[in-house]
Image (tube, rainbow, N blue to C red):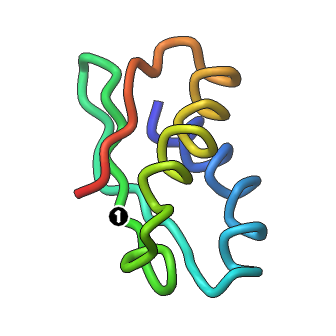
Amino acid sequence: MNEKVEEVLDKIRPSLQADGGDVDLVDVTDEGIVKVELKGACAGCPMSQMTLKMGIEKRLKKEIPEVKEVQAV
């Protein structure tokens, strides 16, 4: 499942990098929780939770039904 998640994150990264940010995969639990670290501009951005939930989580759930939640660590 880690590989599937990385593939989707690779599709999302260019838009994050365009704004000076990035995302790294930290872990995928057996329960379907994806843990990521927001980097660069995304790390301190007040909109980072919206990016995480409405952008990253929504896309991961759409492409990988086993994903239940995305959490920033």
Query: On the image, which quarter does residue 28 sit in?
Result: top left
Q: Is residue 36 left or right of residue 3?
A: left
What residue did someone put label 1 on?
Answer: 37
Query: On the image, which quarter does residue 10 sit in?
Result: bottom right
> Residue, x 76% and y 53% (percent of image)?
11
> Height in image: 47 above or below 45?
above
Could you say which is closer to the camera, residue 37 or residue 10? 37
Label 1 crowd (10 A; few <14 / some 14-19 / many >=20): some
Q: Is residue 70 left or right of residue 27?
A: right
Residue 38 position in % (x across, y down)? 41, 68
Residue lying at the far front in this picture: please name it: 46
Could you say which is closer to the camera, residue 52 or residue 67? 52
> Residue, x 68% and y 21% (percent of image)?
62
Residue 15 position in % (x across, y down)? 76, 67
Q: Is residue 10 left or right of residue 42?
A: right
> Residue, x 31% and y 43% (percent of image)?
71
> Residue, x 63% and y 87% (percent of image)?
20
Residue 54 position in % (x across, y down)? 59, 38
Query: On the image, which quarter does residue 17 sit in?
Result: bottom right
Q: Identify the image quadrant of the C terminus.
A: bottom left
**Residue type of the residue flagged with mark 1:** Glu
- The kind of secondary structure element at disc 1 is strand
> Height in image: 65 above or below 27?
above
> Height in image: 38 above or below 63?
below
